[in-house]
Image (tube, helix red, strand yellow):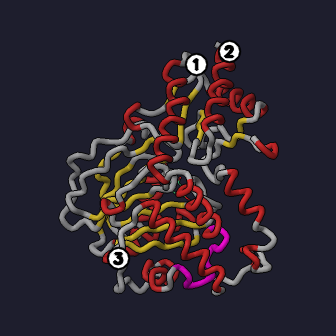
Amino acid sequence: MKYGRTYNFSAGPAMMPEEVLEEIAAEMMNYHGSGMCVMEMSHRSQVFQQIRDEAEADLRTLMGIPENYQVLFIQGGGTVQFAMVPMNLMKNGLACYVETGVWSKKAIAEAKKYGQVRIAASSADQNFSYIPDCSRLDIPENADYVYLCENETINGTTWHTLPDTRGKTLVADQSSMFLSRPCRVEDYGLIWGGVQKNVGPAGMSIVIIRKDLIREDLPAFVPTYLSYKTHADAGSLYNTPNCWAIYCCGKVFKYLLRHGGLEAMAARNAEKAAVLYDFLDQSRFFTGAVRKEDRSLMNVPFVSPSKEQDAAVVAAAKAAGFDNLKGHKSVGGLRASIYNAMPKEGVEALVAFLAQYEAQHL
Ligand code: PMP
């Protein structure tokens, strides 16, 4: 690693591609002859408008977003979307949620403030270590949408096949897998992702919403800022947006396009995750926490034989240059987040370290 950088396994904010950080650094003092840094720029200027427009255009190309979908850049991170989704989409006041872990539970708790929530399926019975069978969901006729967290960052599960929503609108939180693999946008009514994991700096979400779901007739209590229509009508420039995040995300979109797009990312991510999972599968000291078929390629939770050992491994790993391997406080153990920007060498080096640790402590 250049610049004395560390292999950072944080779940987010997380590593960004070095190539992108270098470009940003080179443009820091004077962006394209504008005489200013993007942080200092008016969001109403032509130069920023171009940054914003290119970011959207590149994202559309990357994901193959159809014309009848709107792309929105909204401040506030993922937690704001837990509220915006029910506020904007609950017309009949009823939605189905699939409960797969910490982040879908947060979404459920928030949605309950605005309407009725039906848990269509859950993996709570086994500590959220798997994705429940959703081939025959019981979805009421008047349900407004079916919601899932497509990659549970803390629990380490991912959906490899989407559920059958019986024609109801599918809403997905893609925060921790956004742009990690190809995605058929047409299968969803709304996709949203906080960008601080696989794309850029914290404090913004990208929302991709089918245009017919953008409502004019929202209840009066919905704050102006929390209406998707506000952002759609203003091209995500209703107020001062998170200019810096839009700029950095735009850089990452260009980087992904240069490096083969989402197909190439998916292949790289599968290869990378296999290095770690193959190690865990044969280890007699470390154990993966998730059912094999449902394992995330982005977040890999695992445990050692005891809590004390978990803490000792995390400390030894940090001293050896592998940072942020502590599992989330709600589940414990260890977790390696290996988003797009984590190089394969980082995962290989981690596995070599864990193998050596095992040999010394078994
Ligand atoms: N959804 C998922 C899947 C997440 O991993 C997170 C953050 N870790 C959130 C939502 C919440 O995002 P934020 O912290 O930006 O509010």
Secondary element under disc 1, as helix, strand or loop, is: loop
Contact (Cβ within 8 Å) of mark 2 with mark 1: yes
Q: Which residue is mark 1?
A: 285
Kindly identify the amino acid type of the residue bearing the numbered disc 1.
Phe
Q: Which residue is mark 2?
A: 361
Disc 1 crowd, CA 10 A, few/some/many (<14, 14-19, 20+): some
Q: Which residue is mark 3?
A: 211
Which of the two residues, 264 or 295, is positioned nearer the viewer here? Answer: 264
Q: Is residue 33 left or right of residue 350?
A: right
Kindly identify the amino acid type of the residue bearing the numbered disc 3.
Lys
Of marks 1 and 3, the one in the foreground? 3
Which of the two residues, 37 or 12, is positioned nearer the viewer here? Answer: 37
Camera sees residue 156: no
Residue 124 versus residue 313 in the image, above or below: below
Camera sees residue 347: yes
Residue 318 located within the stretch drawn in magenta: no
The quadrant where residue 60 appears: bottom left
**Residue 20: x %, y % from top left:** 67, 57
Of marks 3 and 2, the one in the foreground? 3
**Majority SS type along the magenta span:** loop
> What span is colored magenta in the figure?
236-245
Disc 2 crowd, CA 10 A, few/some/many (<14, 14-19, 20+): few
Residue at image position (63%, 81%) is: 240
Kindly identify the amino acid type of the residue bearing the numbered disc 2.
His
Disc 3 crowd, CA 10 A, few/some/many (<14, 14-19, 20+): some
**Residue 140: x %, y % from top left:** 20, 61
Q: Earlier in the sequence, mark 1 or mark 3?
A: 3
Image quarter for ligand 1 equals bottom right
Q: Is residue 313 left or right of residue 35?
A: left
**Residue 338: x %, y % from top left:** 58, 42
Secondary element under disc 2, as helix, strand or loop, is: helix
